[in-house]
Amino acid sequence: MTAEPAALDQWYVLGAIGDFPQGQSSRRLLGTNLAVTRAGDRFTIESNGPPAAVRTDYGHLWTTLGTPARPVFDLPESRESDRRAVYCGAVTVRASGLRLIENFLDLAHFPYVHTDILGTEARPEVAKYEVEQRRDVDELWATKCEFFQPKAAAASEGGQISRYMYRVVSPFNVMLYKTPPAAPDRWDVIALFVQPVEPDLSIAHPYMLVIDDISTDAELIGFQQMIFLQDKIVLENQRPKLLPLQPGRETPTRADLSSVLYRRWLKEKQLRYGVEERTDLA
Amino acid sequence: MWVPIALGRDVPRGATRAVLLEGEELVVWRGEAGTVQVWEDRCPHRGMRLSFGFVRGDALNCLYHGWEYGAGASCRRIPAHPDLTVPPTIRAKAFAATETGGLILVDRDGTGGPPPLMLAGLPVASLAIAADPETLFQLVPATPRPDPQLVEATLDGVRFHLGWHVPGPGRIMLHALVLDPGAESRALIALHKLRSEAEARRAA
Ligand code: FES
Ligand SMILES: [Fe+2]
């Protein structure tokens, strides 16, 4: 499948800067092979045509195969000096990148997929939360999310009601803001940058900007990887692998409000990469 | 049409099993009451395969968000909304299923009529063979039964009931029951010999 303009005209992550050796390496994005050349901290990225645009933001290498209307999204927390930036390692997932983002936005799976860590079967209720498409910045925000968590983060001592916010900045990039155990008045940032390799094959690049001076990097990475591998089992066994946008294919309830608005937003953008082919449109 | 898809003993109470039938993913499961169920292996909520789910009492629960499906395949609990009365329209896709003579059979298209009845055999094995049914049954002296995809056969002097289904092109899954008590070991050896011969013939 060749990518359509809605998918091409976006910025995509290719990996953490530290993962690129000096000299040549190769990556794949939207079904296209890319040759990445690193000389010191300068990068060039080439596919078939002229060199592609390059950005090095938030510790990652970014590119585009089209002409994005906007720069790479802003992540103001990256400028706060008391935060630790933690790379958690790339994870390959045999599923549409859109399924990865949707799963990241989902609260209701915590008790079942992250049992006794991010949720418990004894308290599975998803309280009403709010989702808003901010048209001025073209972002999707879910706010006032609350969930009881037995072990919300690497540094948690016991259960707590965690507060969450989600910020979807583009179809394949999302941030989660979560109250840290150590500083209830601020927000930890956990980002998920997704590199769509093929419509049904993705590389997830989780990245954290946290306020935590107790846990070691290894503890933070270990915690995040454990959570993500639990999600991977689900993601690779959803059917279809591509995200269905056709009405009636799946059954959302109130807890799925963020998914419903995410899908509506994708439809508005006429995004098709990673989307199941529709049969209801003539 | 009724198609054998598994041995009953391989789906004990409280268990789920994924079965691929002509490219279609099915889940076979058995609740505490003992009745076997065959459904599409897909949760209507967000498409998670139900074979990854867990059985409690007489219900199958989806692994992803814990939606609970009763024996009739209708969803009766959505944990994220504990007070919600689930509308009856929310249901998994169930197929007609039956169990006879040690075999589990499914009628996916509803054209099978009354379910087959067979004498009990001793289940020995479900065996995946990389061959199509035509190639395989050239090697098996078999007496057809009135039911499709079910034969009586004798291999190396052991009498069998053989049911089968086709997971996908060029593959067959054989479900073997022995009719002679005490012949299970000879039966297993005969089946593995049959597999080698069928796969060799295919390679040739
Ligand atoms: S996908 Fe099955 S409960 Fe959500
Ligand atoms: Fe998760």
Image (tube, coloured by chain):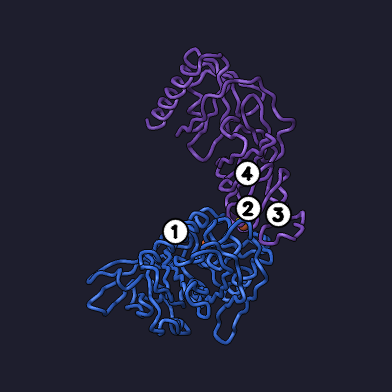
Chain colours: A blue, B purple
Identify the image quadrant of residue A28.
bottom left
Whether residues under marks 3 and 4 lie with C-beta atoms below 8 angstroms apart, the answer is no
Q: Residue A208 falls in which quadrant of the image?
A: bottom left
Distance in Å between CA atoms under marks 3 and 4: 14 Å
Q: Can marks 3 and 4 be said to lie on one chain?
A: yes
Residue type at numbered disc 2: Cys
Q: Amino acid at mark 1?
A: Met
* Dot 1 and dot 2 residues touching (CB under 8 Å): no
Residue B138 at x, y = what percent? 49, 23
Residue furthest to the front in view is A157
Q: Chain of mark 1?
A: A
Q: Chain of mark 4?
A: B
| A192 lies left or right of A47 | right
Depth order, front residue of B94/B185: B185
Q: Disc 2 vs disc 4: which is toward the camera?
A: 4
Task: Look at label 4 and name its amino acid.
Answer: Val
Q: CA distance from mark 1 to mark 4?
A: 25 Å
Secondary structure type for disc 1 = helix
In the image, ligand 1 is in what quadrant?
A: bottom right
Residue A23, disc: none
Earlier-in-chain disc, 2 versus 3: 2
Residue that mark 4 sits on: B55
Q: Is residue A130 left or right of residue B184?
A: right
Q: Quadrant of residue A248?
A: bottom right
Question: Taking A171 as reference, is A1 above or below it?
Answer: above
